[in-house]
């Protein structure tokens, strides 16, 4: 009876206690990195990503794994983690022009969307004029982010493989770096 009265007087507090607290969000530099990188002898679920067309060795390369739906694909990492949604991140420094191979673990087998950022200026964000970007299934990039359905890939119980081609600003749009 007392519990009902307290809930009637403090509806929001009661609702919050019955739903549960959101997941803790780590500091920005650590978000998504726990259990993200493949381990030696990794059994999976994971995916090995060959990133090609890296323009130069400036900055770092960042591979992110997102849920494969338009609402959560490329959503802020803080929001995904707080909601307990799948999100993983690995970074590679130093970087070499050309190609790099990264391996990222998935929380469980399923459909996910991958994005790669060549953060050339090191600010942790995508800079349209400077940085490079690529997505799983290599969709043609336009001025808006691609639909999750165009980049969704299936990660099974083992280790899968895929290739992502980097795109950089070229004129008014984006495309792979021309090969000399």
Image: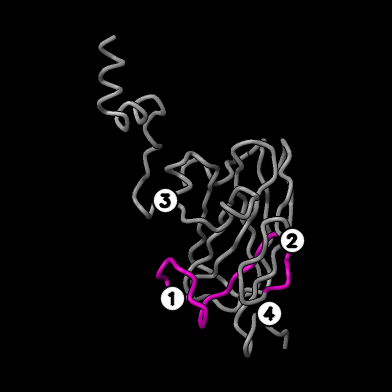
Q: As drawn, is 16 to the left or to the right of 156?
A: left
Disc marking residue 172: none
Whichever of callouts 1 and 2 sits on the residue coming sooner in the sequence is: 1
The residue under label 1 is 121
Query: Tags 2 and 3 in contact by the CB under 8 Å rule?
Result: no
Start-end of magenta stretch: 121-141
The quarter of the picture where residue 20 lies is top left
As for residue 126 lying within the magenta part, the answer is: yes
96 or 65: nearer the eye? 65
Other-residue count near label 2 (Cα within 10 Å), few / some / many at <14 / 14–19 / ≥20: some
Disc marking residue 78: 3
Other-residue count near label 4 (Cα within 10 Å), few / some / many at <14 / 14–19 / ≥20: some
- Of circles 1 and 2, the one toward us is 2
- Of circles 1 and 3, the one toward us is 3
Q: CA distance from mark 2 to mark 3?
A: 25 Å
Q: CA distance from mark 1 to mark 2?
A: 26 Å
Q: CA distance from mark 3 to mark 4?
A: 29 Å
Q: CA distance from mark 1 to mark 3?
A: 22 Å
Query: Tags 3 and 4 in contact by the CB under 8 Å rule?
Result: no
Whichever of callouts 1 and 4 sits on the residue coming sooner in the sequence is: 1
The residue under label 4 is 175
The residue under label 2 is 137
- Of circles 2 and 3, the one toward us is 3
As for residue 94 lying within the magenta part, the answer is: no
- Of circles 3 and 4, the one toward us is 3
- Of circles 1 and 4, the one toward us is 4
For the point 35% across and 31% down, the residue is 16
142 or 177: nearer the eye? 142
């Amino acid at each position: 009876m007392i519990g009902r009265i307290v809930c009637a007087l403090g509806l929001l507090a009661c609702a919050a206690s019955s739903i549960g607290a959101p997941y803790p969000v780590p500091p920005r530099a650590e978000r998504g990195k726990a259990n993200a990188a493949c381990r030696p002898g990794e059994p999976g679920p994971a995916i090995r990503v060959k990133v090609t067309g890296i323009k130069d060795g400036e900055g770092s390369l960042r591979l992110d794994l997102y849920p494969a739906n338009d609402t959560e694909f490329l959503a802020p990492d803080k929001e995904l983690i707080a909601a307990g949604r799948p999100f993983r991140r690995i970074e590679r420094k130093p970087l070499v022009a050309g190609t790099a191979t990264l391996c990222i673990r998935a929380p469980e087998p399923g459909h996910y969307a991958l994005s790669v950022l060549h953060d050339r200026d090191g600010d942790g964000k995508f800079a349209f004029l400077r940085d490079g970007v690529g997505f799983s299934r290599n969709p043609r990039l336009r001025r808006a982010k691609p639909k999750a359905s165009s980049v969704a890939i299936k990660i099974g119980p083992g280790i899968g493989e895929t290739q992502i081609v980097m795109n950089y600003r070229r004129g008014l749009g984006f495309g792979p770096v021309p090969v000399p």
